[in-house]
Every structure is written in structure tokens, then in C-alpha cells.
Amino acid sequence: MLAFLGAVICIIASVPLAASPARALPGGTDNASAASAAGAPGPQRSLSALQGAGGSAGPSVLPGEPAASVFPPPPGPLLSRFLCTPLAAACPSGAEQGDAAGERAELLLLQSTAEQLRQTALQQEARIRADRDTIRELTGKLGRCESGLPRGLQDAGPRRDTMADGAWDSPALLVELENAVRALRDRIERIEELPARGNLSSSAPAPAVPTALHSKMDELEGQLLAKVLALEKERAALSHGSHQQRQEVEKELDALQGRVAELEHGSSAYSPPDAFKVSIPIRNNYMYARVRKAVPELYAFTACMWLRSRSGGSGQGTPFSYSVPGQANEIVLLEAGLEPMELLINDKVAQLPLSLKDSNWHHICIAWTTRDGLWSAYQDGELRGSGDNLAAWHPIKPHGILILGQEQDTLGGRFDATQAFVGDIAQFNLWDHALTPAQVLGIANCTGPLMGNVLPWEDKLVEAFGGAKKAAFDVCKGRAKA
């Protein structure tokens, strides 16, 4: 293209030129005319050349010049020449080809930039659509909230849809969206101010009561409260005193009745104090008795009791169990299912050759010492079995819970009905040493009264729960009648 333009310019610039007026005159030529012709300025010469032969009018007549110089010289032969002005970029070269490659790279860069701008515009459009949906949802919620507001807080006039369809890249629409969001924010703030105003109005101080009347009411209220407290104390004292008196009277009556029965039926060899029994009629996991006295640390013990099983030939259950924090089976006497009776000390087990399956009263004694873990088992005053290495050198831990009739899986609870004792328990006593065989025989024959020095069998120390019953009973008399 540039080459073509250069050629056109060369053709236009090619014109015939007139003969030069400064050619040499023959012989008698006027020197002044020749000098004026030869000394004409360059612009006039170039203008004459462009005008050609027909456009030349000769030199101008100056004032003071001779008249002979006015007449033109005789015409001479015409000359023509071509004038062509070269252009800098007439034809493509290697540099021009390099510039073309740079232009193509720049065009590709512009196309890539345009594609990125188009993607950005699409993302902005999607975001604006999401903002429109959010604002519509907020507008709906705000309308539902305003439906319950006072009329003064509701905007007058119809609500205009700020999300009308339009060009998403319009600046006016963006300004409209910002105004709509700002209006929604202001209306929400006004709604949130309502509870605070309500609280302020509800917490307004009530009319003040006259000071004298208020103090009089406080004084009367204090007097009334003091009178009520005094009456409550008097009633509690009377109730406590009457309860103690009733217990003492009942205890005396029981003693008198026991004395009368003894005189009527004749005296026996042994009548233990506080004679009673604990009865558990059915197998369950909620009937039991608890001995309310702390057990100290023991390095030896003897536990004796009277038992009558009513299990009907199956496992006799658990006559007693002693648990401590961290060890539920510190001391347990248990017969489960068809297994023989077992003594557990610190989860160590020894099987005892004892039997309670005939539903009669039997006297049971268990003796143990931490030295070498020696143990002995007595039934009805006779030694039935002995052994060693049962929790040897293990002291019985203090501050536990002693339960009659249930086996403890945790401290003081989580009983299992299949391991419950069914029947009667009486005269449970605990010593801090091993009794001799003669002492055990005397207790079993009701000839050697002996109370436990750690836990004696006393009514005030035994409490029944869950339906287990305590009843007055002298085991020696009852056994003799049986």
C-alpha cells in the first residue's frame, strides 16, 4: 500500500517545465536584465517551473528601470524535466515485516484482554443477580416484619420494585441497588430499636408510694415473718419432743412385752438385746438393708450371722457385701446359681463348703486374716472348711458401705436381681479379729452372748429400704420353737 502511494505521488509530481528566462542573450544583451534574470529568488524560480511554459509572464518591471528591459527576450527552445520526491517507506522492507509481526502480537494481546473483560462482566452480572435475589428475600422478610409494626413505622405509599429488569452493567442500576440496600438497613435498624423502646417504657418507675406508708408496711411484714418463724420453731420442737417420747414409750412397751412373753414361756439361756430380723420376701434389685456405721481399716475380721434362705433350692444370692471406693468387691459372701457359696476379698475368690438349701435357720461365721490370707468357714458352730492365700497381706479398706441382701457392682448401688438374697437375716455382727472355734460354738448354741466390736447388731444401726422389713425376732427362741 505504501509503495502504491509513492508511485502515485511520483506521477503527479511529473510536469513539463518552461524554458528558463535566464538563458544567455546574444551579444548586445542588457546586463541589468541578465542580472535580474539570473538573480531571481528561488521561490519565484520554482513557481515558474511549476507553472510551465504557459504560466510564465516574465520578470516584473521595477520603477526606474530602462524601458528596453520591459520587453521579453525572444523565445528559445523549450526544455522539460521530471521531478520525483522519494518517500521514506515506499516499499516494504525487513523492518516493516517485523513491525507487522509486533502488530499481530499486540492484536492477540488485545483479544485476550477483551476475553478477560468479558468473563469479568459475566461474573459481575452473576453477582448482581445473586444480590438481587438476596435483596428480594430481605424485602419480603421486612414486609412480614412491618405487618406487625405500628402504622407510624411503616413506609407510606406503595413499595417500588428496585430490581426492575434493566442493563446489569448500567451505573444507574448499581446506584439504585446501593440506595435500596441502604434503605433496607435503615428500616431494619428502626425495627431493632422497638424492643429497646418497649423495655424502656416497661421499666418506667411506678408512682412512688408515700414513705411513711411504705415503712409501716415493711415493719408489719417483718413482725409477721418473725411471728411465723417463732411458731415454726415451737412446732418443730414439740414434734421432735413428742417423737422422742413416742419412741421411748414404744421401746419400753416392747421391753415389757418381751419380759411378759419370757415369763409366760419360761426363761431361756440367752436373750440378745435388740432382737430383730430383716426379711426380704422376693428376689429383686431394690430390697435391701444398710448398716449405718463406718468400718475401719481391718487386718483381720470375723463376720457371723443367722440366715434362713427362701430361694427354693436355687442360688442363695448375697447375704452381705462390703464395697469401698475403687473396689466394689472388697468383702462379698455370695452363692450364685448352682455354684457353691464363695467368699470374695478384693476380688479374690475362695469356695466355701456351706449349704443353706433346707430353708431352716443356720448360723454362719467367716473368719479371715491378712497374714498369708488364712480363712475359716463355720456352719452351726462347726468348722466346715479352711484355706490360705486369699488376698494375702491385703488390708480391708475403711469408709465403705455394708449392704445386707444385695451384691454391689458400684459403691452402694447397681444391684443385680439374680444375685439378691431371699429370706431372713438376723444377728449380723463384725469383729476386728478372728474368733476362736469355742467362741463361734457358744454364739451358735446361744450359750455365749457376744456382740461385734466393729459392727454390733442394733436396731438404730440397720435401716431397711425398698420394701425390706424389720421385725422383732429372737433367733434363739425362734430356732428352739422350730
Image (cartoon, rainbow, N blue to C red):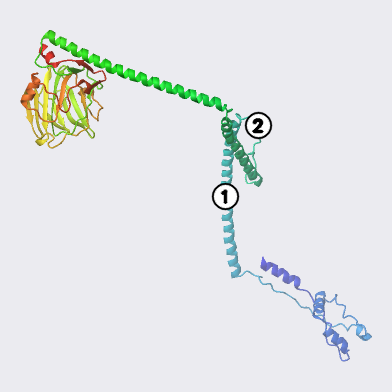
At 72% from the left and 72% from the top, the residue drawn is 10
Please determine whether, in this image, residue 4 is positioned above or below residue 36: above
Amino acid identity at mark 2? Gly
At 57% from the left and 55% from the top, the residue drawn is 113
Percent across and percent down for residue 429 are: 15, 24
Amino acid identity at mark 1? Thr
For the residue labelled by badge 1, is the local secondary structure a helix, a strand or a loop? helix
Percent across and percent down for residue 339 are: 14, 25
Left or right of 14, for residue 419: left
In this orientation, which residue lies closer to the viewer: 152 or 51?
A: 152
Q: Which residue is mark 1?
A: 120
Please determine whether, in this image, residue 67 is positioned above or below residue 421: below
Left or right of 470, for residue 437: left
Residue at the right extreme, as displayed: 67
The answer to whether residue 381 of the structure is visible from this angle is: no
Q: Which residue is mark 2?
A: 152
The numbered dot on residue 410 is none
The answer to whether residue 107 of the structure is visible from this angle is: yes
